[in-house]
Each structure stands twice: as C-alpha cells, then as structure tokens.
Amino acid sequence: MSNIATKVKDCIEKSSWIRRMFEEGAALREQYGDDKVFDFTLGNPTMEPPAELKRELKRLADSPIPGMHRYMNNAGYEETRAAVAEVIAETCSRPVKAEHVVMSCGAGAAMNITLKTILNPGDEVIILTPFFVEYKFYIDNQGGVPVAVATGEDFQPDLAAIETAITAKTRAIIINSPNNPTGVIYPKSTLMELGALLKRKERQTGRALTVISDEPYARICFEGSVANIFDCVENSVIVTSHSKDLALPGERIGYLAANPSMPEVELFIQGAIFCNRVLGFVNAPALMQRLVTGLQRCSVDIEQYRKKRDRLYAHLTGLGFKMVKPGGGFYLFPQSPLEDEMEFIRIAQKYLILLVPGSGFGAPGYFRIAYCVEDDMIERSLEAWGKLAAEIGLK
C-alpha cells in the first residue's frame, strides 16, 4: 500500500542521481569538513546581488508603497512588464510591449506556463541533448512527450537531425543558450536557419511549431551576446529569470515574453495568464517585481565568472581533460576520461571532488562542473584535480 502516485515514484527513481549526489556530498562534508570538500555540483551562484538591488530594497522597506503586498493582475505589474519589454525590444526589431510579457515565479514557472498554454495531450516537444535535467518532467507535467535530439560534437544544434525528428505531433522545440550544461552559445546564423526550417515544416504539417528559448544565462556571455530569438523565429517565446544575472535564485522571479509577430499572440498571452493562475503560481512575487523593475539593465560582474571559467578551463585542459570551451553560463562539460562516467565520478570523490554525471543531462560519457563557486574553493581544488588526473592516467 502506497500513498504516492506510481508516476511520481517513477520520476523520483529516474532523477535519483540528483538525490545520490546530494547525500554523498553531505556525508563527505560531515566526515571531512566543508573546507575540505570541493563541491562543483550545483549552479547556485555564490555572488551577491548588485548594489543597486540592495539600495532599492532598503528604499522600499523605508518608504513602502501602500498596498504593495496585495494581489495584482495575474500577468504582473504593468510597469514591471513595460520595463522588461523595453529592454527586450532594444535587442530586436520587433515592437515588444508590456502586453507581450507575463511575470513569473522564475524560469521554471515560465516554462511550465508556456508548455501548458500550447500543448495538447500527446504533443511532442523536441529537446536538444545535453539538456537541463528538468525539461522532461516539465513537458510531462503538461501532457507532452519529450523527444531528445542529439547535437553535434561541438554541442551546436544539428538542424538535419531536428528536421528528421519533427513529426505530425511536434508542437515545440526548447533551446537553451548559453546552454546548461555545456555553456555553448548558439550563433544567430544557426537560429535563423532553425527559423527557416520550422517555417517550412509548418507549411508541410499545418501545425504551429513554437521555439521556447530558455534564457536564464543570456547575460552571462564571455564572447559576443545571445541573439534575440524574436528576430530569428516568428513563432517564439522567451522564458527566463533573474536567478543568474541578478544572483536571485531563491527569490523566484522571472518572466515569459511572446514574440509580437507570433500568430494570435494576444490569445497566447491570455492563455499564459490563465495558466499562471490555474497552475497555482497566481502571480510573480510582488516585492521582487517592484525590485527588478528598475534593474533590467543591471547584472552581477560577468568578468568574475569569466575568470573562474578561465582558471578551471586552463588548469583542467593542461591536465589532459577534453572539453568544448563554454562561451557563457556557469558550467564546464568535459568528456569523461573513463568510458563509464559514473566510475570516474566515484574516483573523483576519493579526492573529495563532487561532480554531476552527464547521463543526467542525456549525455553519458561526460560530466558537469559548476564553477559559480568561491574563487578560494577553485584554487584549493587544483591540487586534488592533479591527483585525480594522475590516477586515471591523464597527462
């Protein structure tokens, strides 16, 4: 006899590696102490939010706006949506306005809202491997079917493979640039080709094909910038959060924005507002909306992340690890020096290095390193990385 749904039990088992990594890390910390364990598992930024946010928070605390904690329109405050739209419009040629934006409880909520708005039961959603671990669960939440499509050796989208994967049931494709876990950025030329491909397939199938661009790392770019999907794909939605660029992961503040050129865009927004409510999010946190309204052009110091990337990338490639150099984000995604990446991860734990297996991202044979950690921990870990490389026979 069980009081948990079979489906949820199955999902827990499928994501059990997350629980195992957490439990093993906790056990190592208890045994050796926090300062002896090198935990590269979580994309949980150690940076503090920008000073502008702290000043605005203090101003609101000292001079609260009457009614500032009450309900508002489920889409969010008009002034917040307008501020978001203004910044998006600066990077594309589309007339993005407040009415194209819905504030959300982070990017996860925005993704679920978007999927619920567009999916009928059994509709397929293409995801590109390696992918963020929750995508499959989000798609399943809203009655869809995930279809994983491999990327190239450089982790760039394989347009031929995407075209082959599109069927009469395909409804959407999720892209993530800079990507979690690889850090690669998709060039505008590729996104333009994707837009042309989807237009052609829409004519063939008679079904709208929506690109959902998941962009929480979009401002954390080290080479160039992330192309605005609105100029590349007519039928597109941006979902994102301020978890990374403003270092606010625990505050759950983000948004979705619809391309003004999307067919029936007003109806899509109406659907998204309805889904925001009935999924139980109701509205994005009122205080956080007030805070981020004036901070749409602010971010943490991106150069600090570049330095972390460069330090670890140079050291690890010098030891013989092979990887694509990330163009942004928080992560390195090296090839496992051993055929079985779980065996490699177990050996790494001997040196108190905690890593995430590539299998969890749909890419066995790799492992993920989250370098959004304190510089001191990176420096202290370098000797352990050297010992690990020596044991497994690298340079």
Image (cartoon, helix red, strand yellow):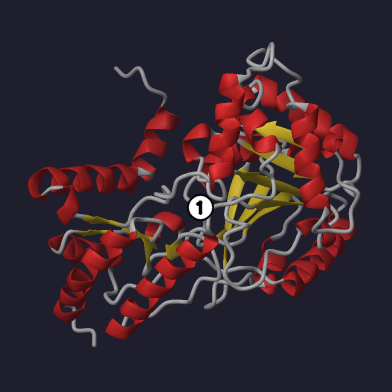
Would you say residue 90 is visible in this rendering? yes
Towards the viewer: 153 or 352: 352
**Quarter of the rendering containing residue 70:** top right
**Residue appearing at x 80%, y 43% in the figure:** 85
Percent position (x, y) of residue 378?
A: 29, 64
**Residue appearing at x 39%, y 49% in the figure:** 46
**Quarter of the rendering containing residue 293:** top right
Percent position (x, y) of residue 249?
A: 49, 40
Towards the viewer: 254 or 47: 47
Using residue 17 as the reference point, say whether residue 93 is left or right of it: right
Q: Disc 1 marks which residue?
A: 132
Q: Quadrant of the N terminus?
A: top left
Would you say residue 281 is visible in this rendering? no
**Quarter of the rendering containing residue 110:** top right
Q: Residue furthest bottom?
A: 395
How many numbered dots are placed on residues in this image? 1
Using residue 314 as the reference point, say whether residue 272 is left or right of it: right
Using residue 75 as the reference point, say whether residue 337 is left or right of it: left
Towards the viewer: 82 or 195: 82
Q: Residues within 10 Å of mark 1 (few under 14, many from 20)?
A: some
Percent position (x, y) of residue 202?
A: 85, 56
Q: Quadrant of the C terminus?
A: bottom left
Percent position (x, y) of residue 236?
A: 78, 51
Towards the viewer: 53 or 44: 53
Query: 365 above or below 33?
Result: below
Q: Amino acid at mark 1?
A: Phe
For numbered disc 1, what is the local secondary structure?
loop
**Residue appearing at x 37%, y 73% in the figure:** 311
**Residue appearing at x 27%, y 83% in the figure:** 319
